[in-house]
Image (spheres, coloured by chain):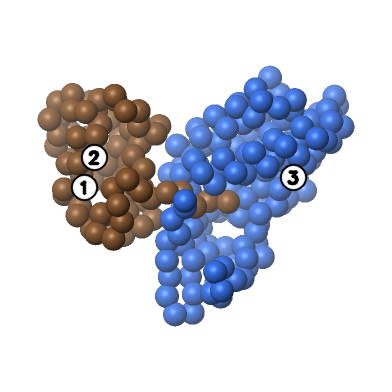
Amino acid sequence: MKVSVLFFGATAEEAGTAKAEIDLEDGIGAETALTEILDRYPKLTASRDRSSLLFAVNQEYVRADETVNEGDELAVFTAVSGG
Amino acid sequence: MGLMFFELTIDPLDVGEIARRVVPEECGATVTLDGYVRRFTRGRETEYLVYEAYKPMALKEMERLAAAAKDEFDISNVAIVHRLGKLRIGETSVVISVAAPHRRAAFEACEWLIKELKRTVPIWKKEVYADGEVWVEGE
């Protein structure tokens, strides 16, 4: 299945793009999806722990047991720094 | 349900105008945070900042926070406006205005909202110095 992946700020620079379309296995768990994304974009975890990245599915912070479906909008970004 | 509004804009923010928009007749006080760009951070001199947002998610998070604040504090109206793009020193980056029947709840809700905004709303700032730049990562 195809999903889109968005990156912002530091993760966009490291991924070399703000948006990508990737192929994932149907109905994959969110944690596994994140692993797949980080495997494709190793610079995201080159200088920080995976645990410091935030992961959203369809514009909401991901829940532990969530699955990812065809057409979903995923986003991977660093801890936020607005204000 | 009171008036709530949430905006992201690249235009300069007019703090007074935002604050006046949330004033209802039943309220007695509006507390407004005017957050602006500081020259020195961790001893380093900033030339300017660039803010970027995951816009649709940021607006949803602002709305969620305002709803949570209304549940927690005795307040009526909330405005949250964040500027994006390039900001110079001293320019306003964020305005949070909370109107309430009495000031104490407005102060408490405003403090809670900025703390939560800095923790959960997907907006990032890049600090640009004379000799480099860095995307700031929150805690």
Is residue B36 among the parts visible in the rendering? yes
- Distance, label 3 to label 1, CA atoms, is 40 Å
> The disc numbered 3 marks a residue on which chain?
B
A48 horizontally vs B61: left or right: left
Q: Which residue is mark 2?
A: A34
| Contact between labelled residues 2 and 1, with CB atoms less than 8 Å apart | yes
Is residue B23 among the parts visible in the rendering? no
Q: Please name the residue shown 45% across and 59% down the image.
A: B136
Question: Which circle marks residue B32 in the picture?
Answer: 3
Q: Locate residue A76, reporting x and y percent.
A: 32, 44
Q: Please name the residue shown 32% across and 45% down the image.
A: A51
Dot 2 lies on which element? helix
- Distance, label 2 to label 3, CA atoms, is 39 Å
Q: State the image quarter where residue B102 is shown.
A: top right
> Given this view, does label 3 or label 1 mark the residue nearer the observer?
1
For the view shown, which residue lies furthest in the top direction? Answer: B1
Classed neighbour count for the residue bearing mark 3: other residues with Cα under 10 Å, few (<14), some (14–19), many (≥20): many
The colour assigned to chain B within the rendered structure = blue
| Contact between labelled residues 1 and 3, with CB atoms less than 8 Å apart | no
Q: Amino acid at mark 3?
A: Thr
Q: Locate residue B87, reporting x and y percent.
A: 57, 63
The colour assigned to chain A within the rendered structure = brown
Dot 1 lies on which element? helix
